[in-house]
Amino acid sequence: MNTKNNRRRRESMERIQKVFIELLQTKELHEISVSDICKRCELNRSTFYANFVDIYELADKVREDLEREVNLLYEAETTQGFNSNDYLKLFYHIKDNQLFYRTYFKLGYDNQFKLEYYDIHQAKQHFDNRHIEYHVEFFRSGFNAIVKKWLAGGCKETPEEMDEIIRGEYRGRVSK
């Protein structure tokens, strides 16, 4: 394929995703149609279907893109096998990408997200390596609830304040 067509396809996909995310702020997923998206993008339905099977595949693509971005934030830790517990960079990312995170939560993907990199060393130290799956679930659910509340309030608190809240909730068990 030539570069011009690749660029055009990429731009079309970006427009489709952008309009989809905008529509999700006022509608539920099942209320959004391919026609709605195509009209707002000024694209043919064939362009949509050349890139996505349906609305649900589009929603999955949005989720994958956000999860990839978040994983890139912690890429060094993942490849080097450590956990810095640096939530500050995540809170900055959330604040800078509020629309995407609101979309992620609205689609319910947070309930499917699994913490892939949990600090087992810390778990051994603080929980005697017992019932780790419960501690992971407690952390994930609590963290997501705090982020949702922060997003719902328009991220008025600073990322530093949010980092302090998380650390306070875990009573020093999350070290810097």
Image (cartoon, helix red, strand yellow):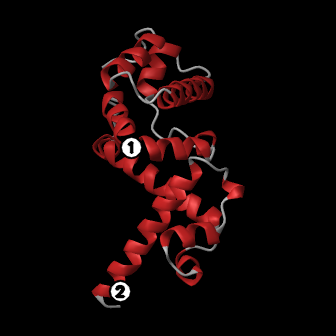
User: What residue appears at the point 57 percent right and 67 percent down from the top-left corner?
Assistant: 37
**Viewer-side residue, 67 vs 31:** 31
Name the quarter where the N terminus is drawn. Answer: bottom left
Q: Is residue 85 visible?
A: no
58 horizontally vs 98: left or right? right
Question: How many residues crowd around disc 1 within 10 Å: few (fewer than 14), some, or many (20 or more)?
Answer: few
- Residue 128 screen position, x and y as percent: 52, 15
Residue 85: quarter of image: top left
User: In the image, which disc is placed on residue 106?
Assistant: none
- Residue 54 screen position, x and y as percent: 64, 70
- Residue 167 screen position, x and y as percent: 40, 15
9 horizontally vs 34: left or right? left
- Residue 16 screen position, x and y as percent: 49, 67
Looking at the rendered structure, the secondary structure element under dot 2 is helix
Position above or below: 102 against 139: below
Q: Amino acid at mark 1?
A: Asn
